[in-house]
Image (spheres, coloured by chain):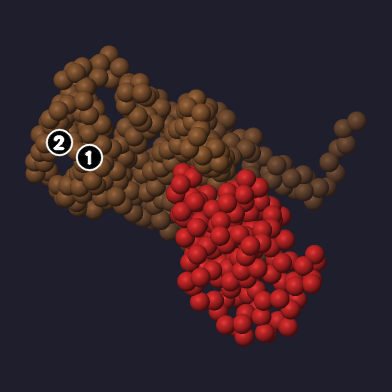
Amino acid sequence: VIQPIDSVERVTELATSMSEAFLGALLGLAPDGTILYWNAGAEELFGYAGSEVIGKSVLDTIVPPEHVDEKRRWLAAALGGGSALYESVRRRKDGLQICVDVAVKVARDRDGNEYLLLNERDITRVKYQRDAQVLQTRFREVLEAAPDAIVLVDSSGRITLVNSEAERLFGYTRGELLGQLVEELVPTRFHGNHPSHRANYFREPQTRPMGIGLELSGRRKDGTEFPVEISLSPLSIENSTLAMAAIRDVSPRKKIEEALKTANRELEAFTYSVSHDLRAPIRQIDGFARILSEQLGPEIDEKVAHYLRRIQDGAGHMGRLVDDLLNLAKIGRQDLKPRLVGLTTVARDAMTDIEADTTGREIRWQLDPLPTIECDPGLMKVVFTNLLSNAVKYTRSRTAAVVHIGCAVRHGEPTIFVRDNGVGFDMKYADKLFGVFQRLHRAEEFEGTGVGLATVQRIVHKHGGQIWADAIRDQGASFYFTLNPRAAERTHGAV
Amino acid sequence: VDLLLAEDNPSDAELILESLAGLRERVFAVEDGVEALDFLFARGDFADRAHVALPRVVVLDVKLPKIGGFDVLRELRADPRTQSLPIVMLTSSNLESDIARGYALGANSYVQKPVDFDRFRETVRLLGFYWLTTNEPPPVSLSRAEGT
């Protein structure tokens, strides 16, 4: 049953509810912009209660300073023509800017006074979607070619364009993102400062990484977070500046870094345990074998003496292995302390140490002047000691051994070499030369643990250099290495 | 007792005693950190030592059961009765971190047990003779008087 409307008041009431429901914000203004009427829709849209704004000018409240002149022109145009339709920008009480669609009509009261009646509707999302269509036709190919998620943001903090990678990474569709504040993609706990950070960026826009030294996180649509790296660049389009954020998900790298840290911790625990516990039983084997042979005295059976010697040899070898391995592990962990070092001095020091153990042998040393290079002198001494003692060891069968230490420029880089006239090795096995425990000679021929060259290689690599060798069987071997600690810092910096 | 040896590994203890040859009678060996502290503070099984002088030196392994060598060292340095008692860390490890820690906690000496038995025997022999015959121990008034 349709109830007839029976009073003017009720009709007015009903009409008011209808206009509230369908028209959104309704404002009544004096010709100078003073607010006279402010409905519930306006309260909702702009965040101001009627009591806060009635009597004030729209120009001091919801019109952003940079749009005041434009607003004046529109009001004048409406007053002149009786009505106007336009789009503009408003600032809400919380500072957020929104886009509105405005319809103005001029009304007169009985006394002939003019008023402006405005109906404003929020078209922010619609406008950004529309603008994105235009931008997208221009930038689509560039954006989609980028490996990173790309999000373009305007100075009001709203997302103006995204690429497919951004949709995938954050789990939103393009339509859901356009026109949203970029904070939508930022974890809630960072929301407090984010608007002021982005305001700062627009004050001085330049290409730079975001949040240097900070751990940044992105937030997906489902609320989950992930670690990101972000680089920002300004992008000028027509007469406005956009910030282009290239966002990279670094969780795979973080995972690897975590795994590496764990592995390093485990290795350290292992090294500690080896250092403490593995030496004791070796010493005990050696010690009791020694005591036993002393107990047996000089009348000892030839075979028994031989076996005891074998036990002690084994223990001794094991002891050297443990020491060399611990040394190799230590060099791996130790930080480079590079300074300018004259390599001639380092090589001569190593040479002097080794000469002490070569009495009775004829060795012709040739030490050419070596360059002064930025490197860790302690570790370089280890390199020379290993290379020179190898040269001495593998020339043992020569009546006159020759060991030549020199420097040649190769591909524009100083290359240090250690050359000998010893037994050399078969180049077929050259790739095994620097592996841990890899030996190219039988233990009876040449003693060794197979750790020395691995240690040398590790030091050279830590210095950003290369090491290689060439040799001819029975005619000698040459070892070459380069150093480049600056490159080492660049590539091995963190780990 | 002039030398207290805290060494949990019976084989190492035997090799150390073997190497100390002529000084053996003056050595007492314990097997963990608790025993070492009880011995020095005359507690528990060693309560009867209350009026006996402290040894001239304590030789501590780093890895001891129950209370580790560094913790024993810390407790000895914290007590006025033993704060100037000569303490030697004798251990297999030559890790810089261990050596630094030993000195930071107030050890008087840090000696790595050589793996080679000849060198081991010589090292332990020298150590024993140095601390028991060459070194002048702190005066009794400094070490025991305050505690009793």
Indicate the chain on which mark 2 is placed. A
- Chain depicted in red: B
Q: Which mark is residue A166?
A: none
Where does residue A233 sit, x and y in percent of width and height?
35, 42
Q: Tell me which residue sits at (47%, 71%) in the image.
A: B134
Disc 2: CA contacts within 10 A as few (<14), some (14-19) or many (>=20): some
Q: Is residue B39 shown left or right of residue A168?
A: right
| Protein chain holding label 1 | A
Q: Which chain is brown?
A: A
Q: Earlier in the sequence, mark 2 or mark 1?
A: 1
Marks 2,1: beta carbons within 8 A: yes
Q: Residue at x 9, y 44 (%)?
A: A369
The image position of residue B66, as x and y in percent, is 71, 55
Q: Label 1: few (<14), some or many (≥20) within 10 Å?
A: some
In the shown orientation, is residue A366 left or right of residue A14? left
Q: Residue furthest front?
A: A299
Q: Which residue is mark 1?
A: A358
* Picture quadrant of residue A481: top left
Q: Is A265 above or below relative to A176?
A: below
Task: From this view, report whether residue B40 is shown above or below residue A192.
Answer: below
Mark 2 highlights which residue?
Answer: A363
Q: Nearer the viewer, residue A77 or A364?
A: A364
Q: Is residue A237 above or below residue A429?
A: below
